[in-house]
Image (tube, rainbow, N blue to C red):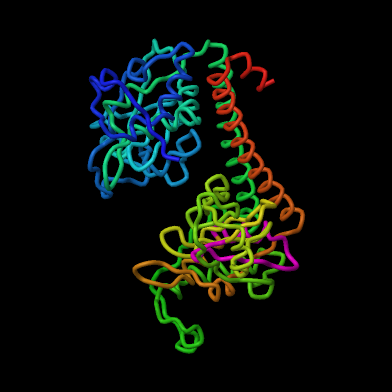
């Protein structure tokens, strides 16, 4: 059945929008729900509301300095530092208007709505984002505002203000008129405390992972290892002939030195070929937004854990159609094509999933898959990726190459410790997501009903 909404001409006065989508009934219902409570407009609460640095070139980026936030870093209420890049401090000072500090906010300006809180001491942001600083006198706490903007009420209000034909952009002028509920300080502070706890869980998750990494690399004496070998070398033709490779990078002495260290310090070493049960890339299914079967793409493989919350989806029948792409608990998944080739995560969920064509699925026997996956994602695996990857314009890591990787096994108690820390890291990340969802749901209940009902939900 067709939906329509009739508005009086007076309600269009002063508006810069005459497109029907802007006046969809759902937006009117959202604003009505919010306006049952005390409310304010976003523009009245902000000191800074400005587009990020325009047209900054990649050549400006630096190895260290001031974190530079791009749209890909806006995830799950927090600015994600996993793929963060940096700009020099002097560049940040040139663009001081959008220089942000802890508990400031960054909004997505391009493609789709997002809002994240800054947890850096200092950062700046790109032109595809909006830098937002609240006034010191604001009625709204920053953690509460970000939480609200990520709810079923806040996201549509931002979505409504995206304009454009080919690429959508958030309208800076109109977005100042986003309606924000003003709840009592006690409720806002409760939401802030939950959000802060969620961030603390993320920090603790990374600490657990780094502890595991230190145990592995220290046990193999490569924690602070820097090869002193020259890049200039000679190789026997027979070794080149047997490897089916002629590129000089494949034969760097660095890799021989690594293998010698691992052989010397590990309890034992095995190749992937000797422990694999299955080693193959997935295949591309058709995607369906309403699908019930999860699909893992290379973009979901992160530096530490899979991005479980943002997996794609397809129809359940693809589980039988794409048997070679099936992913089950404890499978080892590797990013095989492009910039982050070699990244490896272990799938820790019970839920069935499929892997796409740029994800390698490794299933092993006789050894702990979490330990093996952890090693593959460490310096040990990344250096072997550099050795065995193929391609010039775009890097590729094929199953046959992964077969040749070696895995050093340290003493069993330390292996168990690494596995335990990895699982703890995963659980803390999951706990963070649960806390975020709890805070969002409480805000939604407060808007739909009242603060008392929200407090009852929180217990």
Residue at the spot x=62%, y=56% of the render? 346
What stretch of residues is rendered in magenta?
Answer: 355-379
Q: Is residue 338 magenta?
A: no
Visible in this render: residue 106?
Answer: no
Residue farthest along the front direction in this orientation: 1
In which quarter of the view is residue 179 placed?
top left
Q: Position of residue 272 (x, y in %)?
A: 63, 71
Whether residue 355 is situated above or below residue 12 in the rendered picture: below
Is 85 on the left or on the right of 54, as rendered? right
Is 113 on the left or on the right of 170, as rendered? right
Q: Nearer the viewer, residue 383 or 439?
A: 439
Q: Nearer the viewer, residue 68 or 454?
A: 454
Q: Quadrant of the N terminus?
A: top left
Residue at the spot x=69%, y=71% of the render? 275
Whether residue 199 is situated above or below residue 342 in the rendered picture: above
Q: Is residue 369 magenta?
A: yes
Q: Position of residue 295 (x, y in %)?
A: 55, 56
Q: Quadrant of the C terminus?
A: top right
Q: Position of residue 222 (x, y in %)?
A: 57, 57
> Total marks drawn?
0
In which quarter of the view is residue 3 placed?
top left
Q: Position of residue 206 (x, y in %)?
A: 58, 42
In which quarter of the view is residue 331 placed?
bottom right
Visible in this render: residue 293?
Answer: yes
């Amino acid at each position: 059945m067709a939906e329509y909404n009739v508005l009086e001409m007076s309600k269009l006065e002063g508006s810069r929008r005459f497109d029907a989508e802007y006046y969809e009934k759902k937006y009117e219902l959202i604003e009505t729900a919010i306006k049952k409570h005390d409310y304010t407009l976003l523009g009245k609460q902000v000191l800074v509301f400005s587009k990020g640095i325009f047209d900054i070139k990649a050549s400006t980026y630096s190895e260290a300095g001031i974190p530079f936030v791009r749209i890909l870093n806006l995830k799950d209420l927090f600015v994600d530092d996993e793929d963060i890049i940096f700009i020099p401090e002097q560049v940040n000072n040139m663009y001081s208007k959008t220089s942000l500090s802890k508990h400031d906010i960054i909004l997505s300006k391009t493609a789709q709505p997002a809002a994240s809180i800054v947890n850096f001491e200092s950062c700046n942001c790109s032109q595809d984002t909006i830098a937002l600083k609240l006034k010191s006198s604001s009625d709204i706490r920053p953690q509460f505002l970000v939480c609200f903007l990520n709810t079923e009420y806040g996201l549509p209000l931002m979505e409504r203000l995206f304009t454009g034909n080919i690429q959508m952009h958030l309208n800076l002028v109109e977005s100042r008129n986003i309606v924000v509920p003003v709840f009592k300080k006690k409720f806002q502070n409760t939401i802030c405390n939950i959000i802060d706890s969620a961030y603390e869980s993320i920090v603790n998750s990374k600490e657990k992972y780094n502890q595991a990494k230190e145990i592995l690399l220290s046990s193999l004496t490569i924690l602070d290892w820097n090869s002193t070998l020259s890049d200039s070398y000679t190789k026997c033709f027979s070794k080149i002939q047997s490897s089916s490779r002629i590129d000089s990078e494949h034969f760097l002495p660095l890799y021989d030195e690594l293998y010698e260290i691992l052989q010397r310090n590990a309890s034992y070493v095995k190749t992937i070929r000797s422990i694999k049960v299955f080693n193959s890339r997935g295949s591309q299914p058709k995607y369906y937004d309403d699908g019930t079967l999860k699909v893992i793409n290379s973009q979901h493989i992160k530096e530490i854990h899979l991005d479980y919350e943002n997996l794609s989806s397809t129809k359940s029948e693809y589980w039988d159609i794409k048997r070679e792409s099936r992913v089950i608990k404890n499978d080892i998944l590797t990013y095989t094509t492009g910039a982050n080739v070699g990244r490896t995560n272990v799938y820790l969920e019970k839920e069935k999933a499929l892997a796409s064509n740029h994800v390698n699925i490794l299933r092993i026997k006789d050894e702990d898959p979490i330990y093996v996956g952890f090693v593959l994602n460490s310096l040990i695996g990344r250096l072997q990726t550099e050795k065995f990857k193929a391609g010039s314009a775009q890097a590729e890591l094929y199953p046959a190459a992964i077969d040749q990787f070696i895995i050093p096994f340290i003493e069993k108690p330390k292996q168990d410790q690494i596995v335990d820390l990895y699982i703890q890291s995963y659980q803390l990340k999951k706990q963070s997501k649960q806390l975020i969802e709890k805070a969002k749901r409480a805000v939604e209940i407060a808007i739909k009903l009242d603060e008392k009902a929200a407090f009852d939900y929180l217990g």
